[in-house]
Image (cartoon, rainbow, N blue to C red):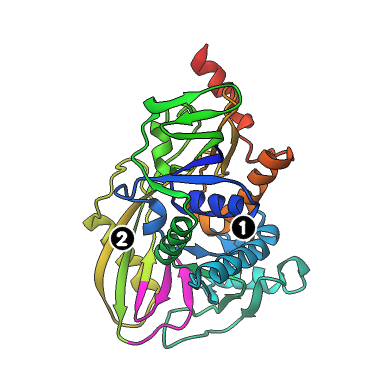
């Protein structure tokens, strides 16, 4: 008898399973290794200031200190350092944007994340930034492949991992538990990423899947920080990851020439260093219509739970909201209204009406 079955070992499932294990729960992770996880393709960027208007990301003051402590603990247990703290430099797009940020120098709410507000050109050998820019701290990237691989090995050592092509027809649901083959548990938590749209129990939730593509480039000389304007440029050893595109219609895993051209065009506006493109990757992000995660119990079948919808910010969202979901399931603490799937129960009621 397990406390929790977890379906999927992408970023959401991995972080949640680890959080439950640290809590002393009995966990079994069911994962289809042949099915590509969006997390494995993701660039893994965690960035406190986002968007064209360069605003502090939602809940950054809570999420970012939490994620730093979480990934440090995982690194200690797995002996693999997958989180790489690295400064991000965001050039200003105009003199108006420069003036706006210069006016924010006395804003203490930004002190934790802003290392420097530059009113003149920095890193002129690397990039075009005639108006200066914003140097950020408490940011960087997660090597998602290293993270998922190392934490999978941890699960295997603790005998709580099973390679399993999950079959919904095999799931038996009772009032206080579920049975799946030989596994019996109090709860089953679906962490299927974009696969959730095929889940017969949660496909009523308003996902808004997004295809994203990145290119891998080899610059002529090393890049020492992350640059982010129009595209992000993340240095990983002698290469850089450059992304990303957003496609809502053609949701497949095939890289496209159009996306490559788009990324190179934006990169050439930012980066001065000569480079060559060495590869291209595509993935599907499990984004949601309101851009907030999906957490909580099924409205009628209480042993069924979902943890999904982390979108493009899974690295920063997953640790804190996995903790919140565990507190909800183990201690009865209420979920935040912004992420609780009860905000969409009216959609479920329409489906069954």
Q: Is residue 28 left or right of residue 334?
A: left
Q: Residues within 10 Å of mark 2 (few under 14, many from 20)?
A: some
Q: Is residue 109 left or right of residue 314?
A: right
Residue 202, can we see it?
Answer: no
Gap in angstroms between the C-alphas marked 2 and 1: 25 Å
- Along the line of sight, which residue is nearer the eye, 246 or 287? 287
Q: Quadrant of residue 328?
A: top right
Q: Tell me the quarter of the image containing the N terminus.
A: top right
Q: Residues within 10 Å of mark 1 (few under 14, many from 20)?
A: some
Compared to residue 145, the image places residue 218 above or below, namely below
Compared to residue 101, the image places residue 349 above or below, namely above
Residue located beneath label 2 in the image = 262
Residue 241, can we see it?
Answer: yes
Q: Is residue 255 left or right of residue 284?
A: left
Identify the main secondary structure in magenta: strand
Tell me the residue at 68%/74% (across/down).
102
Q: Quadrant of residue 57?
A: bottom right
Task: Give coordinates of residue 17: x percent, y percent.
Answer: 54, 50
Q: Is residue 27 left or right of residue 110?
A: left
* Residue at the farthest left position: 257
Dot 2: what SS?
helix
Residue located beneath label 1 in the image = 57
Closer to the eye: label 2 or 1: 1
Q: Quadrant of residue 64?
A: bottom right
Between discs 2 and 1, the one toward the N terminus: 1
Q: Which residues are magenta?
A: 221-240
Q: How many marks are shown on the rendered structure?
A: 2
């Amino acid at each position: 008898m397990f406390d929790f079955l977890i379906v999927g070992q992408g970023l959401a499932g991995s972080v949640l399973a680890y959080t439950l294990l640290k809590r002393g729960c009995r966990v079994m992770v069911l994962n289809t290794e042949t099915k590509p996880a969006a997390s494995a393709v993701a660039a893994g960027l965690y960035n406190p200031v986002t968007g064209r208007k360069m605003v502090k990301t939602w809940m950054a003051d809570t999420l970012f200190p939490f994620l730093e402590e979480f990934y440090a603990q995982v690194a200690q247990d797995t002996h693999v350092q997958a989180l790489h703290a690295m400064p991000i430099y965001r050039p200003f797009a105009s003199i108006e944007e420069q003036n706006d940020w210069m006016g924010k120098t006395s804003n203490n709410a930004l002190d934790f994340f802003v290392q420097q507000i530059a009113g003149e050109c920095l890193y002129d050998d690397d990039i075009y930034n005639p108006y200066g820019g914003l140097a950020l701290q408490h940011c960087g990237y997660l090597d998602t492949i290293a993270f998922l691989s190392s934490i999978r090995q941890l699960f295997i050592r603790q005998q709580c991992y099973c390679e399993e092509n999950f079959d919904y027809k095999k799931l038996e649901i009772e009032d206080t538990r579920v049975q799946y083959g030989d596994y019996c548990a109090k709860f089953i938590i679906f962490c299927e990423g974009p696969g959730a749209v095929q889940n017969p129990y949660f496909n009523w939730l308003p996902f808004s899947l997004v295809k994203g593509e990145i290119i891998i480039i080899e610059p002529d000389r090393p890049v020492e920080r992350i640059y982010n304007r129009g595209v992000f440029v993340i240095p990983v050893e002698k290469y850089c990851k450059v992304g990303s595109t957003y496609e809502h219609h053609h949701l497949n895993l095939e890289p496209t020439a159009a996306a490559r051209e788009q990324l190179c065009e934006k990169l050439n506006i930012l980066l001065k260093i000569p480079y060559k493109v060495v590869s291209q990757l595509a993935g599907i992000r499990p984004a949601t219509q309101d851009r907030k995660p999906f957490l909580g119990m099924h409205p009628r079948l209480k042993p069924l739970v979902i943890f999904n919808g982390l979108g493009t910010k899974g690295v920063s969202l997953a640790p804190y909201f996995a903790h919140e979901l565990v507190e909800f399931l183990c201690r009865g603490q209420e979920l935040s209204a912004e992420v609780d799937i009860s905000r969409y129960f009216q959609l479920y009621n329409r489906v069954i009406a």
